[in-house]
Structure formats: C-alpha cells, structure tokens
Image (cartoon, grey):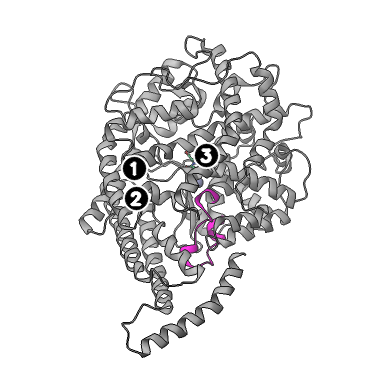
Amino acid sequence: MSGSDRRRQWKLFSSAVVVTAFAVSCIEQPLEPSVEEAEHFIENAESRLLALWIDAGRAAWVQNNFITTDTNLLAAAANAKVMAATTELAAEASRFNGLILSPDLERKLTLLKTSLAAVAPSESSMQSELAGIMAEMESIYGQGEYCPDGQGECLDLPTMERMFAEVRETDELLAIWSGWREVSPDMRPLYERFVELSNAGARELGFGDTGEMWRSAYDMPADDFTNELERLWSKVRPLYESLHCHVRAELGQEYGTAVVAEDGLIPAHLLGNMWSQTWANVYDIVRPSRSEPRYDLTRLLERQNVDPVDMVRYGETFFSSLGFAPLPSSFWDRSLFVQPEDRNVVCHASAWDIDFKSDVRIKMCIGVNDEDFVTIHHELGHNYYQRAYSGQDPLYRTSANDGFHEGIGDTIALSMTPEYLVEVGLLNRVPTGDNDVALLLRQALEKVAFLPFGLLVDQWRWRVFSGEILPDDYNTAWWELRREYQGIKAPVPRAVNSFDPGAKFHVPGNTPYTRYFLAHILQFQFHRALCEAAGIKGPLHRCSIYGSREAGGRLRAMLEMGASEPWPEALNTIAETREMDATAIVEYFAPLSVWLDEQNAGRRCGWQTQESS
Ligand code: X8Z
Ligand code: ZN
C-alpha cells in the first residue's frame, strides 16, 4: 500500500475514532487528548520550529562566514533555542502516545524527535553549555592552521589540501599530515562533554544514546538499519579490496616496499588526501601503464579560463537542461564562492536553505580543479532538493533519508562523461579508443576508495556514544577502525593526547557521516534508473542524462516529495524498487573489476588488522 493509500484509508478510520471520543466525553470521563488536538499541536510545533530554524540558520551562516567570539556566541544562542524547543515539543508530544493517529501525524512526531543531530537535556544551563561546546568545536576547526616552524608563515586547510594533491615528497606530506592533526587535541575534552550532554538529551527523547537517535531516522528499527549497512558493505567490499591491492602495489613501486609493504597497511599520508578518504590525486602513480589520462578536467577548466562563478554556472546549466528553474538572483548575490583573504571562514563546502523557501546558497572556497567542479554539483544538488520540497509542511522539508540529500548532486556529476564535456564546450572531441579503464580507475579512486571511510566514521561515533569506546581509547579505537575497514595506518605513532577524529570536519561539526556511504550506493542506483528513464543504452559510465527532460521529470518528482513518505517510497519513484541496491555501483565498475583482477594476479591482496602502529 502506498503512503497516499494509507492516508486515504486512515481518513475513514479517524472519523470513527472522533465519534467514540465524543461519546466518551459526554459521560464525563476525564478528557483524553483528541486527534484534533494532536493535529493542532503539530501544526503549531511546525510553525514555531520553522521560525527558530530560520533564525538559527542565519546566525550559523554569519558565524561560518565570519568566525569570531561574538558570532560563535550568537550562533550558539540560536541553536540552544532550537534544541530547547525540540526537546520541549517532543516531551509534550508524548501526551498523544496510545492515540490512533494518521500516518502523517505519526510520521511528523517521529521526525520531530530525529530532526536534530544533537539535543541537550531540558535543563536550560545544559542547553547553553552544549550549544556553546558545539560552536566552539566548529570554530576551532574553522580557524585551524599549521605553522611549520611554530611561527611566521602558517598553512590553512585549503592550502594543505592542495599540497596533498601535488606533493610527492614523503617528509613534506608527513609534516602537513601531522601538522593538521595538531588542531584537534584541544577539542578532546570538549568532545567528551559533548558526548555526555547529547546522550542525556537523546535519553530524554526515549533513545538509548545519540547514536541510536541517528540510526532511528531511517524508517526502520535502529538495529535493522545496522544490518542493512552490513549487507550493502558486503556487496562492495570485494571491489574495494581489489582497488586497495592494486593501489598498494603501485605505491610500493613508487615509494619502495620498505615504506609501503607488499601485504601491509598503506600509510595514510600517501593517498593524496588529508584523510585518505578519496585517492584520485594518486591517479598518476597507479594508472594503467602505457595509458595517458584521456583528458584532465582541471586542465580543461584552466585552458578555458573558467573562474569559480563560471564553474557554478555549469552546474546550474546542467539542472536547467533537466527542466529545473534557474537559481534565483539571491543565490548569486549571497553565496560565498571564493575564500576571503581578510577573515576566517569555514571553508568546508556546504549548501544552505536559509528561509526554507527560496533563499538557497552555497558556501565554498572554490579552486579551479576537477574535484571542486564535482563538489559544486554536489552542493547544488542540495539546493535543488531544498527548492523542490519547499512546498511541503516544515517537518517534511528535508530529504527522504539523509543519504538521498547527499546523493543528488553526485548523481548529476556521474553524467559528466566525455560526451557531456564536448557538448558544453569544455572538450574538443570525444576521445576514441578502448581506454575506458583509465576513466573508470579515476572514478573508482573517488567513489570506491571512499566507501569504507564513509562507514567507519560513524562506526566510531556510535561506539563512542554507546560507551563502548571510552575517552582514553578515542584515538586508538579510531585507528583500529581505519585499519579494519580501509587497510591503512597512521604514518607515525600517535601521541597519547591525539584526537585524530577531530581533524575531520564532521566530528567537530557533528554531522552524521553514514549518509555519505549511503549516497555512494544510491547515486549509482539513481544514475542507472535515470539513464533508463532517458532511454540511454550502453555502459553506465558513458551515460549522461544531460538534456533529458524525462530523467529530469523523474528526479523532480522524487525531490518534491521531501520527507513526506518513508524513503522506500521515494526510492520507488525514481528507481522502481524499495530497496537500496549495490548492484548499480558494481555494474558501473564491472569492466574495471576485470582489469583489476588481471593486475592483481600473483599479488597477495588483503591485510592484517593487527599490524603494529
Ligand atoms: O562534506 C561533504 C560535502 C558537504 S555535505 C562537501 N562531503 C563529505 C566529505 O567531504 O567528507 C561530500 C563527500 C563526503
Ligand atoms: Zn553534502
């Protein structure tokens, strides 16, 4: 039965319930709360929360664009109000427990309880304390830098990320890898307290801890969701292990097997990324021999003198080609595209929905390169989603589940095929030849390499929230998971006060991370479904939905639903199935798998998680 069928059926049923309630009140029994009251309650709750979300969003926007003591305080105060209202409303909502409510109302009451990534207990001093800690951790991260000789020239994160893409000297890489991780030990006591307070808040809402609260946002029991992740991971793990095996062998050739052991863990600073989460920057080291990259998107963008705003225009043009309305002028006036030189901003890319209507923006320190070109599309995916669901009730103005929000822009970016680049004038002609392994390998270094990282960040946090990992073990447990899932290791022994999880934006920023793992599965599923809708045949990695109104219409129908239906219904709208399905990503990379197996023949793949350091 679809959600709308269920709603229709409930309408008939609910009038019967109302009559019974009236009859009971006539014989002067104490008045039970009625369904009507519950409806009014939710309506008021939604308008009160909407106003507070908007205020908090504006304060957070200013803080993120201008990090000072005062903006931290203002953002924390606004966030404390949202937390206070949410806990108060969630507690009040328990009055309606036991009432037979419509699926819509039931859904909204659940969404109310899982709408925030952290809630404080209802005592107001704890609310301000938690909000203050959260703003402080975010600001430590946002202002973080590494000063190689302890003074003078300091490097900010965007600069160090660029160095990771280009530098091959292991000593220099090690210095910036370790240097960036000096920002986080100061966060450790804050994080400890954050865990205590947010857990106490989650318990007030009826969850065991904050991790369980996060896992309860997927329209299924929290434990089933854990199993669902395991199911998906088991499908893509062999692909990751093949990629790991090949990359390790090639890095061993480049740096020597004394540095990268043939059957050992890969040192984390050699993978071209500050967190070793994507590996595309080592493409030149691991690429097929005798094969040139068919084109280098960074060079194409530079050759055409494309600037950051032009890059965003390409993204908008793509969405327009699918039938979406152009972005409003306020988007262009109010977004941040370039890192300002005169102040501290949070450079980590983000998309904003300030008024939950049309005031959408992105905030990003754009560099003219292929990685940021993809990230721009990622961010615009958020903005087009936000605009599409703006007609829904406030609690439904979000995605079907958080993996959907993260997967939309990435789905579009999967359509940036050579054919697309020719069509928009970035490339002169579609390269000929049978060199798709090069294309696929490059893509796998982004998408497949990411998968275990996308999982492990919250495996760590869930265990921290549940108390399975205690503060003294924060860092060692982090590296155990890095070894187990990714097969990588810290390049140098970690100091006892290290807090390496804090050197990743989403930990101090308290953004749940499993969403990105889901998005990496879903985007291929969306891509395959939209290619079918567009009537495009052939291998998935050569399909571009650019210009397809059919694909655009299918996508828009799903985006407009927001969170009004359980996510399987939204998935069904686009992909005609209610199951998340890893076969699309496996199919996409199938030709690469064959090639990787050939390369890995005779190599010893896999790793021992127990290896020291
Ligand atoms: O944080 C992001 C986006 C903003 S939602 C830029 N991503 C994750 C990360 O950077 O760690 C996108 C992929 C993973
Ligand atoms: Zn995102």
Q: State the residue position of label 1.
A: 466
Residue 441 visible in the snapshot: yes
Do the CB atoms of the residues marked 1 and 2 lie less than 8 Å apart? yes
Judge whether 251 appears above or below 73 on screen: above
Q: Is mark 3 within 8 Å of ligand 1?
A: no
Judge whether 2 appears above or below 315 on screen: below
Q: State the residue position of label 2.
A: 208
Dot 3, how many residues are within 10 Å of its Cα: few (below 14), some (14-19), or many (20+)? few
Instruction: Say what amino acid the circle numbered 1 marks.
Output: Ser
Where residue 521 sits, quadrant-wise, is top right
x and y, in percent, of residue 598 in the image: 69, 19
Do the CB atoms of the residues marked 3 and 2 lie less than 8 Å apart? no
Residue span colored magenta: 385-404
Quadrant housing the N terminus: bottom right
Q: Is mark 1 within 8 Å of ligand 1?
A: no
Q: Earlier in the sequence, mark 3 or mark 2?
A: 2
Q: Is residue 403 magenta?
A: yes
Please tell me the numbered disc located at residue 230. 3
State the SS at label 2: loop
Where residue 125 sits, quadrant-wise, is bottom left
Q: CA distance from mark 3 to mark 2?
A: 21 Å
State the SS at label 3: helix
Judge whether 188 appears above or below 151 on screen: below
Instruction: Say what amino acid the circle numbered 2 marks.
Output: Gly
